Image (cartoon, rainbow, N blue to C red):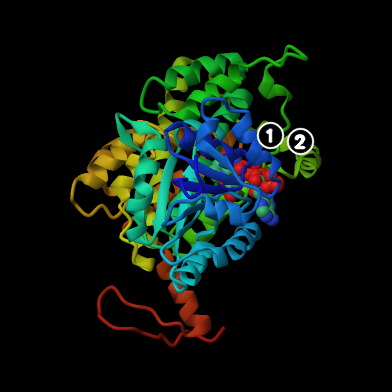
Amino acid sequence: MNDGQADIGILGLGTMGANLALNIAEKGFAVAVGNRTTAKAFALRDDNPGIGENILPTESLEDFVAALKTPRLVLFMVTAGRPVDEEMERIAPLLSPGDVMIDAGNADFNDTVRRSTAVEATGLHFVGMGVSGGELGARHGPSIMVGGARETYPLLEPILEKIAARYEGEPCVAWLGPNGAGHFVKTIHNGIEYADMQMIAEIYGIMRDGIGLKPAEMATIFADWNTRGLSSYLIEITAVTLAETDPDTGRPMVDVIVDEAGQKGTGRWAVIEAQKLGVGATTIEAAVSARGVSSRRGERENAAALYRDVETAGVEFGGETDHIAALEQALETAKIIAYAQGYATMAAASGEYGWSLPLAEIARIWRAGCIIRSRFLDDIARAYDTGENVVNLLQAPDFVARVAAGEVALRRVVAKAVLAGIPVPALSAALAYFDDYRRARGTTNLTQAQRDLFGAHTFRRLDKEGVFHHRWPAV
Ligand code: NDP
């Protein structure tokens, strides 16, 4: 391969960058690669016979830039935050108008909007691209959410369509809107992922602490659930992890793992953005908070001792099969509500930032490659494809029928768990959101009265047009 022949360049060869480079090279594209630790670039070529011939390692940014066809496509896959800005600042003077910088890491979409504005003003282009699917996805087919200047997409599309995951032949990649749209959608994807995982963990908690099932028994149940409505990657891996045995102790693997969950921040961003937009993404919020609580293990152990008697207040969970069916239906119903919240957040952002996010298309590109991939997303795509203005998934006819059929199970499971002292923060947040959302006459009339009393904030009336202030008794 000669200089100036690479179709795309990747800077950053950690877990994601290296695997993405291999995926692109394997599809027949020439990839220039560079990394802060340059040895990794050469190792990537040398350690991958067969694919390595399409990989062009470079030692300096000058070499890297010279290796690229014009307009140059420079993809950053470095640690999110400051390193992205640093790499961009270093390479920008070496690029020419029309070249495209692509941040494919997990950026805060606010950073993407800022970078996009700054870069576009110089004549270069900027694309913020969310990539989901982890290491294996990057290597064999991720779901790719592209945002940025529309005119750059035809430059990227031939490569992205080849490397993306496929669902029934359709590539799981799309241009979703300008500047921060791609990274925003990735953020919401991750928020939904947190909610999905937390709700599964809560059902596991009921099975373990309420019913007394063994992990292997739970694995069989989750594997069975994976054949029906809940069928998804996350349910599949739940069954796999629960079935695994620790080679050191012979005990179930999950029983030897510390119950403190890590997080890198994308779930938190989803909650922050939902709050800024005034959308109640309460299930996602509960999931993010639950990881926070989980990380305070020492505190929890002390509190468990202080409140030992409280846990005996409870209700017995039976082991009968219809109880398992209720758990399945509860999880399915809460899942619809969690996704409705995620989609409501994207719809609000779309309006606020003028993105016109294609909500059906987003569901379609999430059907394969990403962590929340599932058949269920096909149903969401259909709901948004009807042409009717779906204000919230909870108002789409198919989902109305499903939630109406499943809400009793969710209510019973949450109520029993609450009485038994088994925490179900995400499941109960989903139920509370549903009950709040379906209540035509809410209670914030009282809140408005209070606000008007202490702050003269005014209120509107049901029986007259206009804005009113009442002379409340002095308190
Ligand atoms: P890794 O930690 O495996 O790799 C980080 C890369 O960034 C390395 O190439 C490292 O270079 C480089 N780097 C770090 N700091 C600097 C710096 N200051 N200047 C130049 N280069 C730097 O990260 P991942 O591959 O896991 O993640 C990359 C991005 O992809 C992140 O934004 C992450 O959130 C996102 N992502 C990760 C997923 C995953 O499953 N891992 C899934 C989806 C997105 P060096 O080799 O020299 O240390």
Residue 346 image offset from top left, x and y in percent: 39, 55
Quarter containing the C terminus: bottom right
Q: What residue would you read off at disc 1? A: 311
298 w.r.t. 136: above or below: below
Mark 2 closeness class: few <14, some 14–19, many ≥20 residues within 10 Å? few
449 w.r.t. 437: above or below: below
Residue at left offset 79%, top offset 38%: 301
- Please tell me whether mark 1 sits on a helix, a strand or a loop: helix
Q: Is residue 149 visible?
A: yes
Q: Which mark is residue 308?
A: 2
Mark 1 closeness class: few <14, some 14–19, many ≥20 residues within 10 Å? few
Label 2 amino acid? Arg
113 w.r.t. 426: above or below: below
Residue at left offset 28%, top offset 42%: 381
Q: Are marks 1 and 2 in contact (CB under 8 Å)?
A: yes
Residue 65 image offset from top left, x and y in percent: 54, 55
In the rendered image, the residue lying farthest to the front is: 2
